[in-house]
Amino acid sequence: MTMTDNSTGADVLSTKYQKSVAEYWNKEQDPVNLRLGEVSGTFHHHYGIGDVDWSVLEGPAATRDARIIEEMHRLEGAQSDFLLEQLGDLTAADRILDAGSGRGGTSFLANLRFGCQVDGISISEKQVRFANDQARERGVDDRVAFHFRNMLDNGFPAASFQAIWNNESTMYVDLHELFAEHARVLKPGGRYVTITGCYNDVHGRQPSRAVSQIDAHYICDIHPRSDYFAAMSANNLLPISVVDLTAATIPYWELRAQSSVATGIEEAFLTAYKEDSFHYLMIAADKV
Ligand code: GPP
Ligand code: MG
């Protein structure tokens, strides 16, 4: 069935797994996301990159927590900026797609940067509502719209988009199905970008214990690194740039582990990254 904005849960969520993922995000209200979002009014669902300003730990105790949260939010912003830089030279006439758009953060920053029309899709009705409310509050609802749709069957016409990204959302879907659908709606020569956590299958085709703990925490299914390139090449997506962001994201996790908004998954990320069983990777590809 082709998705439209009138699609119901029964249309959008085709498996028990997808229903449980949607339920998780419909319930999610973690301070690690909401308090960080309140710093600037832009709400993200991804991690941070870049060096931490460790001076935030010093100074008056009464404002220490607020300083840490502000710093973590700055690093999340740096991550979105880095992703958007990989999308190429877009103009206000282009239309772009945020696959797994969460509360809308990266979509709004994309609209600010390029002035172009942005569509975001999510299988969480609550996230879609939150992001559309934000679009109205920001006065950009004529340019930025969020849809309750499934990224494996997005309902947009073929060759609709000049660019598509997944910001930490590929670990919820089969990559072959995802890239087939992306390739369908990308224009020829269009750009695809993902920032993702993937496991290092140089060490074998099973995830480490720490990676399995991350999977269980989020109900996701982290893919091996090689699956990204195999699924891209099978779907006419030609990689142009790959950046290992692992070293750049570790400081965010070290700061997060010391913050009041830690969720308990911090040690698993730090272990996985430091033992080399897991990478934080940016991959950009062109549709041929
Ligand atoms: C972060 O979202 C991303 C995910 C949950 C997907 C898993 C990502 C990997 C790289 C494995 P979030 O910002 O809502 O997470 P948290 O609440 O932990 O900050
Ligand atoms: Mg977060």
Image: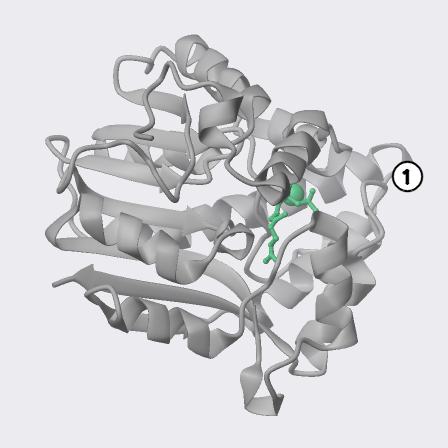
Q: Residues within 10 Å of mark 1 (few under 14, many from 20)?
A: few
Quadrant in which the N terminus is drawn: top left
Q: Is residue 153 above or below residue 48?
A: above
Q: How many marks?
A: 1
Nearer to us in this view, 195 or 58: 195
Q: Which residue is mark 1?
A: 61
Q: Is residue 118 above or below residue 223?
A: above
Residue 71 image offset from top left, x and y in percent: 65, 45
**Left or right placement of residue 251 versus residue 110 in this view:** right
**Left or right placement of residue 14 versus residue 190 in this view:** right
Nearer to us in this view, 119 or 258: 119
Q: In this view of the protein, can residue 41 be seen by the observer?
A: no
Dividing the picture into quadrants, the one containing residue 215 is bottom right
Quadrant in which the C terminus is drawn: bottom left
Residue 89 image offset from top left, x and y in percent: 15, 49
Nearer to us in this view, 74 or 200: 200
Residue at image point 43% right, 38% down: 106
Color theme of the render: one colour
Residue at image point 35% right, 68% down: 231
**Left or right placement of residue 135 versus residue 200 in this view:** left
Q: Quadrant of ligand 2?
A: top right
Disc 1, ligand 1: is the CB inside 8 Å?
no
